[in-house]
Amino acid sequence: MNRSDQNRRQFLQAAVALGASTALSSVPARAQSGDAMTYMTPFGFLMDYAETLYGAVGGQFQKRGITLNIEGGRGSAMGIQQLTAGNVLVSRTGGTDLLKAYAKDPQLVAIANVYPKDLFWVISHADQPIRNIADLAGKTIGVVSVGGATENLLDMMLAKAGIPKADVKREAVGTAPAAFEFIKAGRISGYISTNLTVFLLQQAKQPIEAWSIDKVAPTPGDLYVTTKKAITERPETLAKFLLGVNDTLAALTASTNLTEIVDAMATRFDLAEAKRPDRGIPALEFAMANFRYVHGTRMKPVPETFESAIDLMTKAGIVNGVSDKNYLDMSIWNKAFG
């Protein structure tokens, strides 16, 4: 799935869209006292994480009785480590990262889908396009990091097409639009990055060819992940967290003033995107389409995407199969929205 940052101002219209989502809840809108918890983002503080960053400054979590502390992560591995160590209650993690971790240590569990599919794309130059999996053979492909989610997705695609891993060289290039310059320089033939990177490259009118990995290797998007122990010990807190996210999504998608949202988040979080001349508004506008989607589904996971991912990960040798399907627990989702 597909970013790093923090900081903003008070937001005055936070409760505009709160009523509808409150009616859906089986958990009281206000708790008797604050329920403190720590949440970790995948990578710092980005516009893509506004569903929690904005809720922390707009009062949505507070209205649900949650005192939310948000930590900026530095990759999925860190989030998983902090979860298993008990230092955070919830982390946002890519689906393949969860399944890879679960195969080794089945104490982690997904409770909601916070980002839709189509997160990662294969990007190449329009003059020398990579149009399908077969075109990857014999190429050097950029990945965000060696051994990370994007390299796993590359291996899964190759396994699906029966292409040996050794036929494709890999190079860590990060996820920024600037990595397209490596393609222009002939250093790589293409790279795997997020749908936001595709959008920004298109906005810059770069000559790209791009297609979604999800069309050939379906996997879950970004998930809210916790531990099985936390589900047993803190189900009310987790349900209130999901409701707070849903309330924040409602407020975000009802807003007509994205600058006000950015300003609100900047009072507490150091958002690098907000320091650009465009204030990060294009990035937030792009994220809104994903927020509308997950708000419409109330972040409900799709079990079939987990099964597809496990099948391809097994074929690629990333995991040796998963003996059970307890990597997805719907009890917290049902408690919040059921």
Image (cartoon, grey):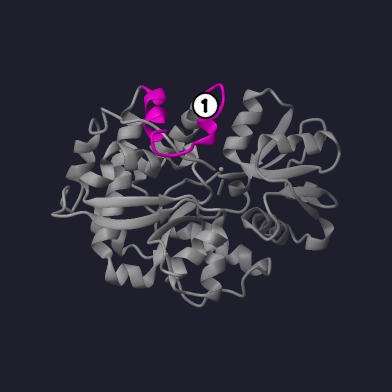
Q: Residue at x 43, y 55 (%)?
A: 302
Query: Can residue 214 be seen here?
Result: yes
Q: Is residue 335 above or below residue 287?
A: below
Left or right, 185 with reference to 54: right
- Image location (x, y in percent) of residue 195: 58, 39
In magenta segment, residue 275: yes
Q: Residue at x 66, y 23 (%)?
A: 204
Picture quarter with the C terminus:
bottom left
Most distant residue in the bottom direction: 323
**Is residue 325 inside the magenta stretch?**
no
- Which sits in the foreground, 128 or 99? 99
| Magenta range | 257-280
| x 74%, y 47%: residue | 142
**How far from the left and from the top, in percent, is residue 124?**
75, 38
Nearest the viewer among 219 and 180 is: 180
Asked whether 299 or 218 is in front, the reply is: 299
Which corner quadrant of the image does residue 39 belong to? Answer: bottom left
Q: Identify which residue is drawn at 32% across, 38% down.
A: 57
Structural crowding at the residue carrying mark 1, measured as other residues with C-alpha within 10 Å and reported as few (<14), some (14–19) or many (≥20): some
Residue 275 in percent (x, y) is at 53, 28
**Helix, strand or loop at disc 1?**
helix
Vertical arrangement, residue 331 with respect to residue 256, above or below: below
Looking at numbered disc 1 in the image, what kind of residue is underneath it? Pro
**Left or right placement of residue 284 versus residue 205 in this view:** left
> Which residue does the numbered mark 1 point to in the structure image?
282
- Quarter residue 165 falls in: bottom right
Residue 56 relative to residue 25: left or right: right
